[in-house]
Image (cartoon, coloured by chain):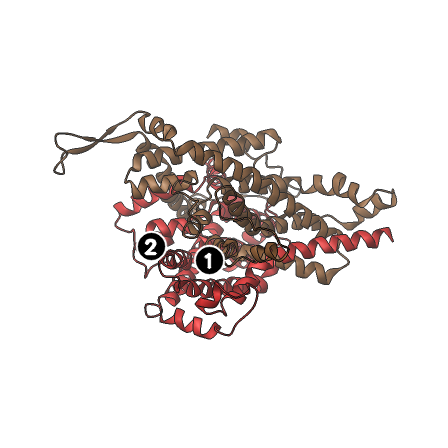
Amino acid sequence: MQKSKRSVSATILLVLGAVYCLIPVLWVLIASSKSSSELFSTFTLAPSTHLWDNIVDLNDYRDGLYWRWMANTALYAGVGAAASTLVSAMAGYALAKFDFRGKSFVFNLILAGVLVPGVLLAIPQYLLLAEAGMTNTYWAVLLPSFISPYGIYLARIFAAASIPTEILEASRIDGSSEWRTFAAVVLPMMRTGLVTVFLFQFVAVWNNFMLPYIMLGDDRLYPITVGLNGLLNQGANQPSMYTSVVTGALISIVPLIALFLTLQRYWQVDLAAGGVKA
Amino acid sequence: MSLITEAAPVEVATPKPPAPRRRKAGGTPYAFLAPALILFAAFLAAPIVYAGYLSLRKVKVSGLGLGSKARTEVWAGFDNYARSLSDPDFLPSVGRIGAYGLIVVPTMLGLALLFALLLDANRTRAGISRVARVSIFLPYAVPAVVASLLWGFLYLPRVSPITDAFEAVGLTAPNLLSSDLTLWAVANIAIWGGTGFNMIVIYTALKAVPSSLYESARIDGASELSIAWRIKIPIVMPSLVMTFVFSLIATLQVFAEPMTLRPLANTISTTWTPLMKVYRDAFARNDLYAAAATSVVIALATFILSFGFLKLVGRRAFDQED
């Protein structure tokens, strides 16, 4: 009796939390079906029939610039996360499985890097990349995303936990080169952990705003966050833009939500221990 | 560096039996580390050093300030720091971020812990728990810019269902984007976006505990509440410490949310948060030196707060070994 009552109140609290989290998503779903006059006049949660018109409007905006933003975002997040995962896997493997001079120094450096606030980096990164003539190019957003101290930290834990030293020895006795051992033995064994490292960085780059906002001037290079921010600013003078902003916001969250739902088990991350309990 | 080694002492590798034989292999580990170290140097170390350097420099204008030779960069000592700390916009932005942090971090982690404990206690009602878990985690997939955009519209008096609800019961609705409520409005976006991720981290730590541990406590007559308080919370403490530190770092750098809300809320100034002031100084005023000084101050404050906190709770920053 007592127990089931408690269970009911626990369920109610959880449902309340879920509703709070879903309201903005529900709202954008409804709002993107409204025409620009309806957006500010009809009841907030009353759906309408203009979703397709809004998508067409968004599509027509400067010859499909919106889709270019989406493609840019996929490029920044995909390439950035893939490169960062490989870099992290190599570094994590070296830190976990080798003894060498300077190892603890390197590891402490990486740990310090985890705690470096990005604010300190943004402006000098911009200036240094400007020196190299790389601001306002894809590289300006890609290169800084290749390094992730937290990814290296995670990869080191995954490597230590998942690669038995005996297997490395066996591979070496077989005459396999170090690089081949890494590619053929180590990477497959670290696979689960590396998916997590990839996802972390993918989401971080996908959601990033400040770095591309600072680095890019040409709106054809924008990721979706910077692009939508710009659209919203235009809406201040041109309220008909608001429907495009709302529809754009809806479409922009679909891919990431789909990714989350399909790869849920990789999100069981123990931040403190670094392990993935899949 | 000394701060770091203090808070996170170098590993005491206690090799598990059988002791893993680590390979001494000449240049190999360096080759594997090379890409990481090169990128680290280029995109973390160099920018930090450069920011420190810029913060101590200034431009000296000679003569009429015309021609390319008239402007030279010289050492400025701590002038930029004095200037940026005494800027009338600086202290209010620090005060705002302080209040914002005091709202966001405890609320977000409190909710994350609560939901994680509820999910864990509710292991039997798998269906509802699963839906709730996914729903609460969902906002993590929504970029801060998009989250601010969605909430921004929900705050607009002309669109807001909150306004409708107030009017339905005959009350005057508060304007959520008015100057005294903006802070709460922005805090809500951060709480909405961050609770789910932290919940998953804590929940994962909880799941690692075998239920048999709780069973025996239950047999001893412990209530669910005291099990949560005496067993579960101590078990997830390391996760709470880490989520706290990461939340603190993220909070002090809030930028995307207020920048996105600005077109909807004229109560958000260009220097609403310290990071927005850095941006304004660097790009709107072209004063890189003041911007560098301010960002060094924010970074130092972040370090002091995170290491101070880690010292306070007496924990190392990270578990060093598997």
Marks 2 and 1 on same chain:
yes
Q: Secondary structure at mark 2?
A: helix
Q: Are marks 2 and 1 in contact (CB under 8 Å)?
A: no
Q: Which residue is pictured at 44% across the width and 58% down the height?
A: A77
Distance between the alpha carbons at the discs numbered 2 and 1: 29 Å
Q: Chain A rendered in what hue?
A: red
Query: Which residue is the site of mark 1?
Result: A180
Tell me the chain of label 1: A
Q: Quadrant of residue B61?
A: top left
Looking at the image, which residue is at 45% across and 56% down? A206
Residue B56 pos. (x, y %)? 31, 29
Residue bearing mark 2: A139
Label 2 vs label 1, nearer the camera: 2
Q: Amino acid at mark 2?
A: Trp
Identity of the residue furthest to the front in this view: B170
Q: Amino acid at mark 1?
A: Arg
Near mark 2 (Cα within 10 A), the count class, few <14, some 14-19 or many ≥20, is some
Chain under disc 2: A
* As drawn, B249 above or below A19: above
In the picture as drawn, the residue positioned furthest to the top comes out as B77
Along the viewing direction, whichever of A68 and B172 lies nearer the viewer: B172
